[in-house]
Image (cartoon, rainbow, N blue to C red):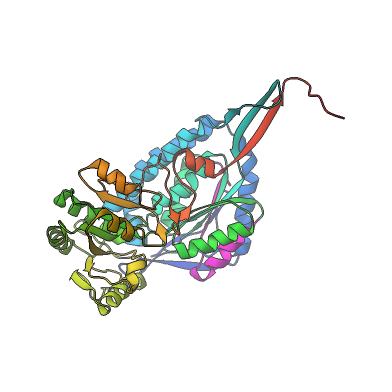
Amino acid sequence: MPITRELFIGGKDVPAASGRRAEDVNPYTGEVYATVAAAGPEDVRRAVDAADAAFPEWAALAPFARRAILLKAADLLDGKGDQVAELMAHEAGGTRPWAHFNVYLAANMLREAAAAVTAPRGEVLTAQEQGALGLAVREPVGVVAAFAPWNAPVILGVRAVAAPLAAGNTVVVKTSEDAPIACGLFVADVLREAGLPDGVLNVVTNAREDAAEIAEALIADPRVRAVNFTGSTGVGRIIGEHAARHLKPAVLELGGKNSVIVLADADVDYAVDAVTFSVFMNAGQICMSGDRILVHESLAEEFTRKLTAKTASLQAGDPNDPHTVVGPLVAASAAQRVAGLVEDAVAKGAKVLTGGGKPDGAVHPATVLTDVPKDAEIYHAEAFGPVCVVETFSDDDTAVTVANDTENGLTCGIITENATHGLAVARRIRTGIVHINDQSVADEPQAPFGGFKASGYGRFGGRWGIEAFSNTRWVTIATQQAHYPF
């Protein structure tokens, strides 16, 4: 019997005004796991009404009280690993280790946000006028519109709301249609249990065909003062255009075409382990996944042989099987899209070292390609699936040129035993994130997380996340009467 969930507005579970519902399908079995309320524009207005009404009291709440709620939510989340594992397996095909990592990182994001509540915020400025004191003060903006994706649903659902709440804002979340419970309603459940006041966080779920209308209605509401979105570059462009049209700041964390560069001084066995994780964790459905593996020609034969063997050993299939490494993609259509990228590359001259072929429902085997020409779609397109392309290079200049040959600029890994060499290469890579002697997938709640170029703008994490959802005001205090010319 499918689970039934409603919208979460004003602290209450309420049906959509139209009474419509949407199906939440298990990608591995194809069965309906849950049905959720399918919101319309009138429900968006109700959610913003609730958030706007709750804002003054939440913004004025004592910082230590706000911090206590976020800390309690983190502790509650820590105890829900098994629940999240079941939820993520059913909604998004997530494996158990991936689900438990979601819990671990999301709980620490809440703790980092809690710490930010009582951290110093603002500066004392040098004033031009004698006897005056100048201040730069950071204050909450009001209602924040947040768009939470499905691929790391608890991590990214929490990230969408943690910093805005810590800064004193209220939030309306529009969930992904592919994991509406894990990335939105579950996060709201945890915060509600922790004592978050009614209306401070509101969650809107919708039918897939209504997504564009719901997003536009949410961003266009004049009471919404900031936006954050994590997802594809294509959809991010639309969200960014809506926000710009209404003169609202946005944090956009978008797609990547990420490289892992294996320099000549790398430890090959370590590089193989690092690359395998980067490419195939969560079936490659991470914005930071390694699409391009660039290997120095002196290591290419050994590295490619070992990577191919390790990849071929990875079990794909049922996310509930503890031995599964590569679970299903979010939908059978996603697996077909990845298979199409591989087929196109092979037709244009690429070689399949392992994997490939037709997917089994939503399951696509772990795949390694080589000799991929520039006119193959996968050369530039984000794979967002369990597939990578291995290329060789002869010198640092070539590696940097290839890594930068993309419109995206999210992250990069550089595998080397020489940190000085790694840093020299890293300084030339045009991304928002780079990891030296590590692969491309990483996130820490205190770090500035975000991309460059078509991978978006703005930063989540640490003080940068708080600043993104705050309004900086200049305040002066005159300690003596000023003199005026007339």
Residue occupying image coordinates x 44% and y 43%: 461
Q: How many marks?
A: 0
Tell me which corner region of the image, top left, top right, bottom left or bottom right, holds residue 314: bottom left
Residue 320 visible, this orientation: no
In the rendered view, would you say 96 is above or below 210? Answer: above
Residue at the right extreme?
A: 486
Q: Relative to 225, is 298 on the left or the right?
A: left
The verdict on residue 213 being magenta is: yes
Q: Quadrant of residue 381?
A: bottom left
User: In the rendered image of this protein, does residue 465 appear above or below residue 338?
Assistant: above
- Give the magenta-colored segment's residue range: 197-221
- Was residue 374 drawn as part of the magenta stretch in this picture? no
Residue sitting at 49 percent across and 68 percent down?
Answer: 208
Where in the figure is residue 452, as x and y percent of width and height?
44, 53
Q: Residue furthest bottom?
A: 347
**Quadrant placement of the C terminus:** top right
x, y percent for residue 122: 57, 32
Viewer-proximal residue, 444 or 247? 247
As rendered, which of 325 and 345 lies closer to the eye? 345
Q: Is residue 246 or residue 482 the one in the foreground?
A: 482
Res 384 quadrant in image: bottom left
**Residue 7 placement (x, y as % from top left):** 53, 57
Q: Quadrant of the N terminus?
A: bottom left
- Please tell me whether residue 4 is drawn above or below residue 480 in the rendered image: below
Q: Residue at x 28, y 74 (%)?
A: 345
